[in-house]
Image (cartoon, grey):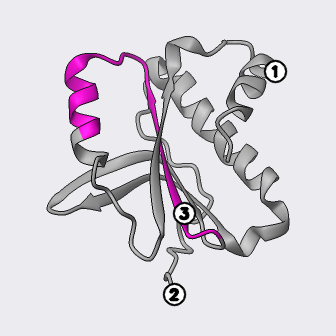
Amino acid sequence: MINPDYSNLNKVRIGNPCKSFLKHEIIKLILTCLILEKHKKEKLYCHVYTELPIVNGERTKKTDLLFLDIRKKSAYSFEIQKKIDDSWNKEINEFYKDWDYPMMNNSDLIIIKLKDLSDDIPTLIKQLEEFII
């Protein structure tokens, strides 16, 4: 059984308080709310963490949002990125290519391109609903 970190469960942590990261932080908040809303009947089996360090071998990386579906034994790491270039893509693919979350049957990475999302909140919510599992 997984021992959840209940002190950080479903809390949205601010990764960077700069104004330039405001949209990034709003997206984390909306994603957290959408995941919790979709899985509201299974609250005990739905864990959402933000800015949580995840470990892959000897490497550690803070993920923007980590969603653990305990019932399905699945882990989903969301990476929200403004600029996706070759170096970032290589770094992320290298880290996540053999990533397995403990006690889970499958682990997946979901990349969200910040520049492709709207600045209008209702439109943004509809766009982010496509990423919810």
Residue 87 belongs to magenta span:
yes
Query: Residue 47: percent from the left, percent from the top?
Result: 61, 65
Question: Mark 2 or 1 closer to N-term?
Answer: 2
Q: Which mark is residue 74?
A: 3
Disc 1 versus disc 3: nearer the observer: 3
Q: Quadrant of residue 109?
A: top left
Query: Residue 49: percent from the left, percent from the top?
Result: 53, 57
Which residue is depicted at the point 35% across and 62% down? 100
Disc 3 element: strand
Q: How many marks?
A: 3
Q: Residues within 10 Å of mark 3 (few under 14, many from 20)?
A: some
Query: Residue 46: percent from the left, percent from the top?
Result: 67, 65
Q: Which mark is residue 122?
A: 1
Q: Identity of the amino acid at label 2?
A: Met
**Residue at the farthest left position:** 58
Query: Residue 128: percent from the left, percent from the top?
Result: 68, 30
Question: Mark 1 or 3 closer to N-term?
Answer: 3
Which residue is at the front of the view, 14 or 101? 101
Q: Which mark is residue 1?
A: 2
Disc 2 element: loop
The residues tagged by marks 2 and 1 sit, at their Cα atoms, a distance apart of 38 Å
Q: Which residues make up the magenta segment?
A: 72-93
115 w.r.t. 37: above or below: above
Which residue is depicted at the point 54% across and 33% down? 25
